[in-house]
Amino acid sequence: MSSFQGRYIVLGVSGSISTYKAVSLASALVQTGALVDVILTAAATQLVQPLSFQAITHRQVHTDLFYPEAETEGHAGHVSLARQADAVLIAPATANTIAKLALGLADNFLLTTCLAALCPIVVAPAMESAMWTHAATQGHVATLQSRGVRIVGPEVGYLASGASGVGRLAESETILAALAAALTPQDLAGRRLVVTAGGTREALDPVRYVGNRSSGRMGYAVAQAAARRGAEVALIHGPTGLPAPTGVRAVAVESAAEMLAAVLREIESADALLMAAAVADYRPAEVAPQKIKKGADELPLRLVRTPDILAEVRQHQQPGLVVVGWAAESTNLVANARDKLERKGLDLIVANPVPQTFGAGEVQATLIGRDGDVTPLPPLSKHELANRLLDLVLVRLQSRP
Ligand code: CTP
């Protein structure tokens, strides 16, 4: 889930059947560290009590009913909310609220706040299909987008009318990912990144394989951070069981050979390749066509080398492709990683000492560049490490001829 630690979010809620979902959105924001001020339109107060939001945010909820008192009693009024907020999220946004926003109307607390806002605005529409596809609504949405407002959803699904169609409020995770992206500089916009993650499985017979314990979390964190910074991301992953991060195109593979084929296909139009996957170095020499039956006390297993994906990538040399590899080293971390960087023709390598002895979820790494740059990092979350790495990738992308 996205983190909103220390962020000040104004959550605007308008009156839709999905208004109740805004309560769990508010809760998710608070749980990930945000300070949340909720503004309900009059219609929203007909559907959910302000008290529900107040109990979750521990803050005064703003409604039009309280509006005059709010200004006179020294509560944050619309201008101070708008000035202080890091972002305004409107979820759900009805056709009526979207239309008024596009026209710059300001006849309630939420709209006045939006008009005075200097921060990014994210809008999650929810309405019946016919209202969403109506030319008026589509025109208003286009107007908002042209002003930099981020629209998230709506999705296709079951609607209040009982019909199925487009108009359903986007899933909370999708809305929060859009909000996180709105709070993140889009410095990778227009860049295409290919990220690999997880371990590969090398078949022994139709039901067994040789594999490794890679969780895939590092590669997923890189893919998520890159997407949040505006990159177009293809995530080529082994079987991890992890959900694909929002906004990332996931390509599932199993063996090293399949991963190689997917990587060569995806890098054709890419700017960077980040090989976080734990690719098997060996595979069973023969794959039995039928399940191997138990028999003798010993069953020797002959293994042969798999393709080295990074080496193959270098042979297919994509001009300007920035290539990042990983190295897990138990001795001479920097020297061994640098050697690997040279051998594999990498631009950057993420050197991890093994074994890692830090708290769950934290990793220590040293980032080493082909240019001799060595950046030792403290133990960081995988998400933070991903962003530090992407900063260095961006520098290299910017310095390409
Ligand atoms: N890698 C690859 N193809 C393979 C094996 C590894 O592209 N068949 C990539 C990994 O994704 C990683 C980098 O190579 O980015 C380094 O992997 P690692 O296993 O540490 O290095 P090896 O080259 O296998 O060397 P060694 O096992 O001797 O440490």
Image (spheres, rainbow, N blue to C red):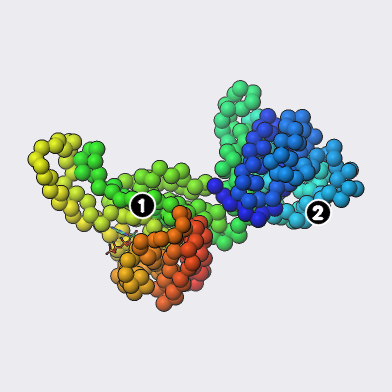
Residue at (46% x, 43% y) in the render? 243
The three-letter code of the residue at mark 1 reads Ser
Q: Where is residue 295 in the image (x, y as percent from the top left)?
A: 10, 37
Q: Position of residue 119 (x, y in %)?
A: 71, 55
| In this rendering, position of residue 54 left or right of residue 166 | right
The residue carrying mark 2 is 80
Disc 1 under 8 Å from ligand 1? The reply is no
The three-letter code of the residue at mark 2 reads Ser
Residue at (62% x, 46% y) in the render? 31
The residue carrying mark 1 is 214
Per the image, label 1 sits on a secondary structure element best described as loop
Q: Position of residue 6 (x, y in %)?
A: 65, 56
Q: Position of residue 81 (x, y in %)?
A: 78, 51
Sequence-wise, the earlier of marks 1 and 2 is: 2
The part of the image, by quadrant, that contains residue 368 is: bottom left
Q: Can residue 38 be seen at all in this image of the molecule?
A: yes
| In this rendering, position of residue 144 left or right of residue 324 | right
Outermost residue, bottom side? 372
Residue at (75% x, 56% y) in the render? 84
Residue at (52% x, 46% y) in the render? 246
| In this rendering, position of residue 240 left or right of residue 297 | right
Q: Which of 391 and 23 is in front in this view?
A: 23
